[in-house]
Image (cartoon, grey):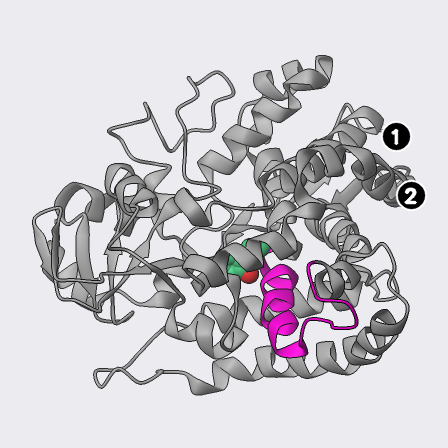
């Protein structure tokens, strides 16, 4: 077996994107807090330490990775703390509260899901990620935000470009970005987003409507004032990346997990009330936001036996925490029946995901609709399931077949 320090100093982001699991398995066992040169950051890989740091009341303010900051610009709620963070949470939370979500989510998701399924159900086969998971995911949030005039292909293109930029994390030995051109896609997406949304904001300022962006502009503002675009855009990018992409990842991952356990798939099809359990396990198995959350050590601090200098960014590897052998039996297996142990799919502490209930509902409804119409769906075993991603992870292609 290779020496852990050699492994750490030689690892590349590209390798992690293909499959982060073997590397993180070694980290959890041998170096749960490790400085990774390719990243210019410490990685924390165990569940216990990720929980401890994400929940810490003080000492570990949120920051954004250098590549994330380069992609979103300053002002995203991911890196806000204290009052500024509370205000931004207050801006996004009204549409995401369970009581609000339950009022709108069926109408938001079911008709579009049914329309897509009707379009391919007689084909007997589909690459289900691009035919279904991604369009359902982006259409739901797009309509909620007020971007119902943006096609799902465009929304998909935006999240993809923002995603590759956000995770363009590699640095050279001087700490500079190793692939500066990797930010070009994100810059292109942002230019398109601004060109499209700016005129809509002009309209929403004069004519508020029920869309989330309209509310972001107006809610809690003094009479006659609206939130500035400088506050809106970085947070809109957060949504146009994570909230657009991850429900689709979660759907695809859950299906891939069920295909790995045909007996469990059959039980879920016979009893759709098991869908939330399947999705929760799918999201544990491969956390959609696998490694994208960063905190900073406010003071010099010793964690997991490693002393971290004040000001060091520390990446919390939630996808690794979810496969921690000390918490889960056979963590690499998808298992509908495993005991529920709180996992880090939706993070923890003050920055725990604000969209947990929304995302979970979208995923549940999408799977309910799909499995109801196609109870005989199975994986096309002549094709590989290709998972990809380190910052964000899910199947890129999942070929399925069914009898018509
Ligand atoms: C909606 C959550 O979005 C994100 C979370 C973590 C990193 C980047 C994101 O866009």
Q: Residue at x 46, y 79 (%)?
A: 70
| Nearer-N-terminus badge (2/1) | 2
As drawn, the label of residue 164 is: none
* Picture quarter with the C terminus: top right
Identify whether 27 is placed above or below 62.
Answer: above
Residue 402 visible? The answer is no
Percent coordinates x, y for residue 168 in the rendering? 44, 73
As drawn, the label of residue 404 is: 1
User: Does residue 306 appear to the left or right of 159 in the view shown?
Assistant: left
**Structural crowding at the residue carrying mark 1, measured as other residues with C-alpha within 10 Å and reported as few (<14), some (14–19) or many (≥20):** few
Residue 304 visible? The answer is yes
Magenta stretch contains residue 367: no
Q: Is mark 1 within 8 Å of ligand 1?
A: no
Identify whether 246 is placed above or below 263.
Answer: below
Percent coordinates x, y for residue 86 in the rendering? 51, 55
244 or 5, which is in the foreground? Answer: 244
Q: Which residue was labeled with disc 2?
A: 115
Q: CA distance from mark 2 to mark 1?
A: 17 Å
**Structural crowding at the residue carrying mark 2, measured as other residues with C-alpha within 10 Å and reported as few (<14), some (14–19) or many (≥20):** few
Q: Main secondary structure of the magenta part?
A: helix
Secondary structure beneath disc 2?
helix
Percent coordinates x, y for residue 395 in the rendering? 57, 49
Q: Residue at x 45, y 50 (%)?
A: 351
Q: Residue at x 49, y 76 (%)?
A: 74
Q: Are marks 2 and 1 in contact (CB under 8 Å)?
A: no
Secondary structure beneath disc 1?
loop
Residue 100 quadrant: top right
Identify whether 157 is placed above or below 348.
Answer: below
Identify whether 167 is placed above or below 290.
Answer: below
- Which range of residues does the magenta coloring cover? 220-242
């Amino acid at each position: 077996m290779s020496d852990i320090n050699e492994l750490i100093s030689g690892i590349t982001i590209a390798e992690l994107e293909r499959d982060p699991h073997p590397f993180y398995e070694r980290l959890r066992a041998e170096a749960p807090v490790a400085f990774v040169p390719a990243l210019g950051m410490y990685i924390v890989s165990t569940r216990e330490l990720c929980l401890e740091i994400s929940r810490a009341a003080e000492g570990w303010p949120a920051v954004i990775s250098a590549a994330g900051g380069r992609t979103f610009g300053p002002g995203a709620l991911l890196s806000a703390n204290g009052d500024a963070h509370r205000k931004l949470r207050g801006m996004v939370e009204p549409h995401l509260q369970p009581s609000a979500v339950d009022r709108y989510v069926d109408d938001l998701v079911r008709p579009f899901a049914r329309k897509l399924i009707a379009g391919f159900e007689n084909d007997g086969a589909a690459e289900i990620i691009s035919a279904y998971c991604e369009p359902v995911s982006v259409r739901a949030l797009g309509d909620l935000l007020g971007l119902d005039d943006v096609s799902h292909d465009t929304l998909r293109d935006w999240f993809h470009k923002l995603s590759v930029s956000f995770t363009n994390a590699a640095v050279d030995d001087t700490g500079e970005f190793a692939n500066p051109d990797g930010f070009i896609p994100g810059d292109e997406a942002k230019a398109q987003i601004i060109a499209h949304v700016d005129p809509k904001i002009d309209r929403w300022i004069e004519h508020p409507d029920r869309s989330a962006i309209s509310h972001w502009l107006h809610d809690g503002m003094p009479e006659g004032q609206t939130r500035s675009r400088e506050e809106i855009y970085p947070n809109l990018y957060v949504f146009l990346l994570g909230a657009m992409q991850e429900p689709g990842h979660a759907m695809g991952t859950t299906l891939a997990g069920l295909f790995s356990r045909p007996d469990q798939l059959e039980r879920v099809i016979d009893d759709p009330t098991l869908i939330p359990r399947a999705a929760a396990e799918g999201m544990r198995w491969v956390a959609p936001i696998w490694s994208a959350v960063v905190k900073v050590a406010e003071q010099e601090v010793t964690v997991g036996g490693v002393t971290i200098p004040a000001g060091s960014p520390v990446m919390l590897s939630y996808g690794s925490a979810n496969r921690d052998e000390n918490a889960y039996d056979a963590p690499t297996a998808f298992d509908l029946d495993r005991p529920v142990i709180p996992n880090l799919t939706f993070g923890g502490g003050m920055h725990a995901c604000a969209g947990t209930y929304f995302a979970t509902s979208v995923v549940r409804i999408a799977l309910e609709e799909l499995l109801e119409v196609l109870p005989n769906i199975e994986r096309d075993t002549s094709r590989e399931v290709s998972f990809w991603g380190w910052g964000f992870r899910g199947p890129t292609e999942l070929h399925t077949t069914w009898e018509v």
